[in-house]
Image (tube, grey):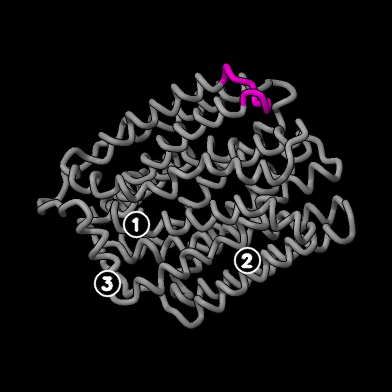
Amino acid sequence: MDETRAHQATTDRLARIVLLACLYFSQGLPFGYFTIAIPVMLRAHGMSPEAIGLASVVALPWAFKFLGAPLVDRTRAWGRRAWILPLQAGTVALLLGISAIEPTPERLFVLGVLVFISNLFAATQDIPTDALAIDLLGVDDRGLGNGVQVGAYRFGMIVGGGGLLAAYDTIGWRGACIAMAAMLTLATLPVALYREPPASAHEAPRYGEALRRLIARPGMVPWFGLLALYKAGESLGGSVVKLWLKDHGWGLDDIGLLLGLGGSVFGMTGALLGGWAVRHLGRQRALVAFGAFQALAVALWAVPATMGDDRALVIAVTAIEHLASGMATAALFTAMMDACEPRTAASDYTLQACVVVTATIAAAMASGFVLHALGFTGHFVFAGVLCALAMLYAAVRPPPTLVEG
C-alpha cells in the first residue's frame, strides 16, 4: 500500500511538472520570436539600434498585468483553467493573423499592434498560470518547480527566437507563425485535460486590497528595489547581443543555432541547477551567488566585443551567460513565490513580476542609446556593473519572510 501511494504521489508530481512546463513553454515561444528573431530581421532591413530598442514597447502588457491580477483572485472559484484556455486559444488565433504580415519597416506599425495584443493575451495568461503554480507547489517543491518553470520558458523563447530564426530561410515568416500556433495548440492539451480541484473556500479580496497588503508587508519595499535591479543589467546587455552578432557577419541561421542550441541547453541546465541549489543554499545565499555569476557572465561579452568575432569564444560566452541567467532567474522566482499568500497568490506574484518586467523593458528600450554612447565593449561592461550592484543589494537585503503555502 505504501509503495502504491508513493508511486501515485510521484506520478501526480510529474503530471504537475509537465503541466506547468507546457504552460510556461507556451509563454516563452512567441515572446522569444518577437524579442529575439524580429529584432535581427529588422536589423537586416537596416533599422537602427535605437529604433529597434524602442520597439520593445510592444512588451508593455507584461509590465502592467498586475492591474488584472486582483480580478483573477476574485474569480478563483471559476478555476485557473477558465482563464488559461481562452487566452491560449486567442494567442493561437493572433499568430495565424500575424502570419499574413511580413516584418518589413513599412508594416511595422500594424505588426506592432498585433504583437502588442499577443503580448497582452500572453501576459494575462501568465497571471492564472503563476497562481496555479503556487497552488500546485509546496514550499519544498518551489525550487525545483521554478527551475522547471524558468527552463521551460527559456526553452520556449529559444525555440521561438533561435530555432525558428534558424529555420526562417526555409519556412519563411508565414511558416514560422503557423509553426508557433501549432506548438501552442499541442502545449495546451495538458491543461485542457487537467482536472482542477475546487478552490478553497475563502472570501475573495476587494480589488486593490491584495496589492495594498503586499506593499505594506514588512520588508517588501526594499524587496521591490531588488526586483527592479536584479535582471535589468542582464536585459540591457542581452538586448544588443543579437545586434552585435548581426553586425559581425553572423547570418540568421547562425544566430538561431547559437541562441537556440547553446541557449536552450545551458539555459535550461542553469534553471534546473539553480532551482535545485536554492533549497540547499537558502534563498538569500542563492540570490547573491547566482547574481555574482550573472554579473560576470554579462560582462564577459566585452571580451569578444573587444577581440573581434572569435566564434569559439562567442559560443563559450553564450553558454556561460545562459547558464548564469537560468540560475539567477530560478532563485529570484522562488523567492518571489515565497512572498505570496495563498488567497491572493495571483495578485502577490504578479505585482512582483511586473516590477521585474518593467525594469527589463526599460533597460531594453534604453539599450540602443547606451550602445550609441558607449560602444559595444562599454555597453557590456556597464551592464555587468548593474548586475553586480544587484548582487550587492541582495547581500544586504534578504528576501521577505517566507509564507507557507
Q: Where is residue 39 in the image (x, y as percent from the top left)?
A: 67, 38
Name the residue tied to disc 2.
Answer: 294
Q: In what element is the residue under mark 2?
A: helix
Magenta: main secondary structure equals: loop
- Could you tell me the amino acid type at mark 2? Gln
Residue at which label 3 appears: 217
Mark 3 surroundings within 10 Å by alpha-carbon count, few (fewer than 14), some (14 through 19), many (20 or more): few
Left or right: 175 as drawn, with respect to 317: left
The first of marks 1 and 3 along the sequence is: 3
* Pair 1/3: label in front: 3
Secondary structure beneath label 1: helix
Region rendered in magenta: 99-107
Q: Is mark 3 in CB contact (under 8 Å) with mark 2?
A: no
How many numbered badges does the structure rendering display?
A: 3
Are discs 2 and 1 less than 8 Å apart at CB?
no
Q: How far apart are marks 3 and 2 (CA)?
A: 29 Å
Q: Which label is found at residue 349?
A: 1
Which amino acid type corresponds to the residue marked 3 in the rendered image? Arg
* Residue 370 image point, x, y percent: 70, 58
**Distance between the alpha carbons at the discs numbered 1 and 3:** 14 Å
Which residue is found at the position 56% from the left and 79% from the top? 392
Residue 103 part of the magenta-drawn span: yes
Q: Which residue is at a point 32% across and 64% down the rendered structure image? A: 139
Label 1: how many Cα within 10 Å (few below 14, some 14–19, many 20+): many
Identify whether 300 is placed above or below 253: below
Dot 3 or dot 2, earlier in sequence:
3
The C terminus, quarter of image? bottom left
Q: From the top left corner, tell me how far across and down residue 38 is, in percent.
A: 65, 34
Q: In which quarter of the image is residue 87?
A: top left
